Amino acid sequence: MNNSNETAASAAFRKQHTQRFLAAAVILLIILWCAAGIDYSGLAAFSPQMGLEVLRGLMKPKWSFVYDGSGEDLASLLLLTIGIAFLGTAIATILALPVTLLSASNLWRSCPLVARIGKFVCNVLRAFPELVYAIIFVKVVGPGPFAGALAIGVHQIGMLGKLYTEEMEAMDETPVEAMHAVGAGFWQTMFFARVPQLLPIYSSLSLNHFEIAVRSASTLGLVGAGGIGAPLIFAIQARNWDQVSIILLGVVLTVFVIDTLTGLIRKKLR
């Protein structure tokens, strides 16, 4: 009996080992195939001298660009970038809630088609990056920060709608069932059973996506949607590496501060 158990365990171990080996081999082949498809001809134009020139420029930030009162300095553009991210996240947070009510399957047990349609809407909205939406909204409402806020907002409706829906479907239904047992209606269970459970989680998710929106808003200026992205790309094109350096430092510091503050708030919400 012991020998048969040992044989079965040995066979299971060999099978598991073979599966892992095959999975690793497949992943390695995919990596090699992707690497083989990359065009490396650009490396011929690379020179160590050029790389050292860029590094020397980045090591000497242009401190005079931090603030000069013109409204086009680093401090003003970073504040604008944060404003774009905040407005976009606020739009997404508000509009993701009705999308969640349509997408949560536990709210539509009698008509699951509605939940499928809601999930499909979320998939479509988050399928395109913010830059694509920014290009569209720059054409629709004109260049400027509002186009950037709309781009972030529309993209994050899909992102937050998906996350909100998953939390709604995974929540503890015991309080809801107890309220139904005493005659509570849909909206009563929503506000007195579901919202108290989900509000801290939803707030944490929105704060996390605000951090992501700040990083996204830093690049939307590339297509005329406001923020720090436009002067960054202009400085790179002009090879003003000292200005590039101070802009990158400002973005890194801003993201670090926001990450720290939102992290503290999320801990309080738990």
Image: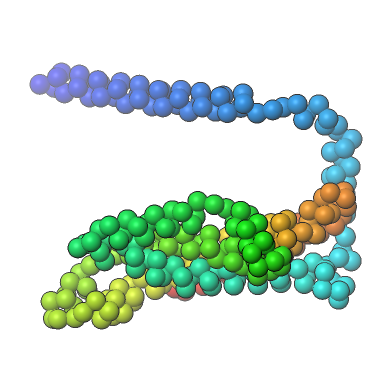
Image coords of residue 46 (percent x, y): 82, 31
- Report whether 121 appears left or right of 247: left
Picture residue at 19% right of the left edge, 63% below the top: 110
Residue 121 visible in the current orientation: yes
Q: Residue furthest left?
A: 1
Whether 77 is drawn above or below 52: the answer is: below
Query: In the image, 14: left or right of 20?
Result: left
* Image quarter of residue 235: bottom right
How many discs mark residues in the rendered view?
A: 0
Residue 167 shows in the view: no
> Is residue 104 or residue 263 the one in the foreground?
104
Closest to the observer: 58 or 116? Answer: 116
The residue sitting at 55% across, 66% down in the picture is 153
Looking at this view, is 153 or 200 the one in front? 153
Q: Residue at x 77, y 30 (%)?
A: 42
In the figure, is residue 208 to the left or right of 139? left
Q: Residue at x 32, y 56 (%)?
A: 116
Residue 23 is situated, as x and y percent measured from the top left of the image, at: 41, 27
Please identify the quarter of the rendering in which residue 162 is found. bottom left
Instruction: Identify the residue at the far front of this view.
Output: 140
- Image quadrant holding the N terminus, namely top left
**Relative image position of residue 249 (x, y in whole percent):** 76, 59
Spot occupied by residue 77 in the image (x, y as percentages of width and height): 76, 68
